[in-house]
Structures are given as structure tokens and as C-alpha cells.
Amino acid sequence: MTKDWNRRTKLVHQGSRRSQYGEMAEAIFLTQGFAYDSAEQAEARFIKADEDEFIYARYGNPTTRMFEERIAAIEGTEDAFATASGMAAVNGALTSLLRAGDHVVSSRALFGSCLYILEEVLTRYGVKVTFVDGTDLDQWRAAVTPGTKAVFFESMSNPTLEIIDIEAVSKIAHAEGALVIVDNVFTTPVFSRAVDQGADVIVYSTTKHIDGQGRALGGVICGTTEFIRKTVEPYMKHTGGSMSPFTAWIMLNGMVTLDLRCRAMAEGAERIAAALEGHPKLSKVIYPGLASHPQADLAERQMGSGGTLVTFDIAAGKEAAFRFMNALEIAKISNNLGDAKTIATHPATTTHQRLPADQKEKLGITPGLIRLSVGLEDADDLIADLMQALDQA
Ligand SMILES: *Cc1c(COP(=O)(O)O)cnc(C)c1O
């Protein structure tokens, strides 16, 4: 019934359910359970719950369901399952699918907790994991074999903003019957075309752009009804990683402005990257929307945007990077991303601190590297702030 709506309309209306009061704003059903009219009704619902019937908030809740329907419509998947955090989504997508003896191929440049799940958790239960350089298609071709059950990667890597070609990797994976699971956080749902490009399962940390105001942890797994309801849901509902109704309400409200925010942030990021490029104190400015990015064509084809993050390297190293960060007046020093407030992160000493030196070098995490998550402030003000801070670096 809503199939013909464009994205902005879906972001405002899709999935809304109204009680008998006809409330305008989406209601928060802050309830763990639901009362039945009769013992017979309870029995029937445990046999099969209809679309609008709920049993227990860990299994599903009207507010959470509204969020799931809205994000599935945006991503273009049949269904979605909302989770307590982005990591509950990554863990849920992988652990619900895999069992001892299965083989997974994953890109190496991963968010630290994703790496932990693949390297420490899955292998503990007998899943075999092969890591590849995600940008090297030959390595994917060599690693994916007829027995490979799934491939996993972050479509844009953190913090060096390398793009992994979803379409090309999906072709390689599908030729061997492997499921393609993409962590699409850095791409954002607004710039995602992952389903069209071949991804089977898309996970988001909704903590980032979907909330967009740094208020709550959340996550979501998007996929076919078959995968979400037969594979993911039984695992999630019995292991306790479901999203709370209150969080779902925050995310529903974040969705309303998601398109506007991501586009404004990407516009700001593009202007900031252009202003920073060539600055004498910087050895490198990385932004997928700059012509100098080695994968600029792929970024344009895959996302139609350079995204909302800019990474740059202060040539003089750690002390200069710290002086720069401490001199910032608008941008905050923190480690979230996708927030309305611009955030500067020093990956080498925070998010990637625990990586051994050779790994940092391999991933391009140099002592002067700064990751900037561009917010919704005026781009001219941000550029002025970055320039005065660079003067002090
Ligand atoms: C933040 C993040 C996660 C984890 O999400 P949480 O909501 O913090 O659990 C996973 N993957 C990527 C790429 C992220 O940026």
C-alpha cells in the first residue's frame, strides 16, 4: 500500500501504527508484556501471533515494530529486526546463521568489536574465519570457496574511508552460494543502495546517523523475511538482544530527519575536505568525494556521495594532532559518529589504541591521523574552527 512512496515520505510515515486514540506522534508502548482476553487467545497467540499481536517485548513490541518497518522500507529489504546495539546486530546476524564447521570470509579493516566477534567469538565455536584486504578482489576470489557460508565487511572502512565494492564482492560470494552481510554504518541508510548491489543482509548501528543526536545505543538487521524471522528472530528473542521500546521511539524520531541530516552533513564534509586539501600542515586528506580519493569513482557509483566523514593526517605527528584537537572550539573530542555535533577522534590513541603497531601501520592509522565526523553546524564556522586549530597544531 505504501510501495510507491519516495524515501522522505517513508521516513516520516512508514510503519506508523495508531492506537484507538489516533495519536499523531508514534506512541511508546513501554510495556514488557500484553494481556490476553482469554486463555484461548493466549494459547492461539503462542501458536501463531498475527502481524498486530504481541507476546513479550523481547520478542517484539508495537513501537519497535514501527521502527523495523520504517528502516526495512528505507533499506529496501522485506523485513528487519531491531537490536539493543549495533554490536548486538552484528553478533546476531553472524551467530544466528553460523555453526561449527562453517567458513566465513571477512575484510580485515573492521570496527574493533566486529573484529572481536569474528576473531574470538566465532572461532571459539568452531567457525573458520579467513581475513582479506577488502579492497582487493583477488583476495576475495581466493578466499571464498564452495563451502563458504557467508562474507562480512564494512562497506566503508574506519578510519581511512576505503570503499569495498559491494557489487563485485557479492558476485564472488553468490557464485559460491555464500550470504553477503554488510555493515553499512559509514555509508548510512540514505546513501545505501546495498540491496540493489547484491547485499543479502545489511546491519546498522543506529547509535550513529539514525539516532543522529548521540542519545541512545541501538542496532538493526535488515534482510529477507525468511532470514529475519526464521534465522535471526529465534536467536535474538531467546538470547536477549532486542531493542527497547524507548530506544525504538528515539530511532523512529531520528528517521524523520535522516535524509535531510545525512545530506547536510555530506555537503559540509565535502566543503571541509576541499578546504583542508593542500593545507601545508596536512600530509593527507581522505574523503571519498574528493577526486584525489583512489576510489572516487567507486564511491560515486556505490553511494552517490562522499559520505559524512573526513579523515586527515597532521604531518608533524601525535603532539601536533593533540594540540590541534585541544584548540578546537566547535568540534568536540569524542568517538561517536553521525552526530549532529561535529566530532574529532584520534584513532591511534582511542578507538584503535589496542592494535599492535604493525597492524596500525597496515591500516594506515598514523600518529597524526584525525577522523572528523561532520555534524550539522554551519560549514563556514567549522572550516574557520579547523583552520584556527591547524594554526595552533
Ligand atoms: C559503532 C559501530 C558498530 C557498533 O555499534 P554500537 O551501536 O556501538 O554497538 C559496528 N560497526 C560499525 C562500523 C560502527 O561504526
Image: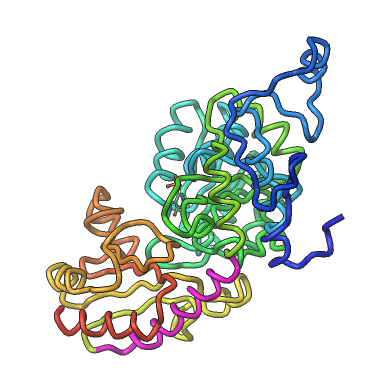
In the image, residue 90 sits, relative to residue 261, either above or below, namely: above
Seen from the viewer's position, the closer of residues 346 and 375 is: 375
Q: Position of residue 107 (x, y in %)?
A: 48, 53
In percent of the image, x 39 and y 73: which residue is there?
310
Q: Is residue 200 above or below residue 51?
A: below
Q: Which residues are magenta?
A: 258-279
| Residue 295 versus residue 166 in the image, above or below | below
Q: Nearer the viewer, residue 209 or 17?
A: 17
Q: Quadrant of the N terminus?
A: bottom right
Residue 65 visible in image: yes
Write the residue at 63% across / 75% down: 301
Residue 146: x and y in percent read 67, 43
Give the colour scheme of this rendering. Answer: rainbow
Q: Is residue 267 magenta?
A: yes
Number of labels in the image equals 0
> Relative to the observer, which residue lies in front, 241 or 41?
41
State which quarter of the image contains the C terminus: bottom left
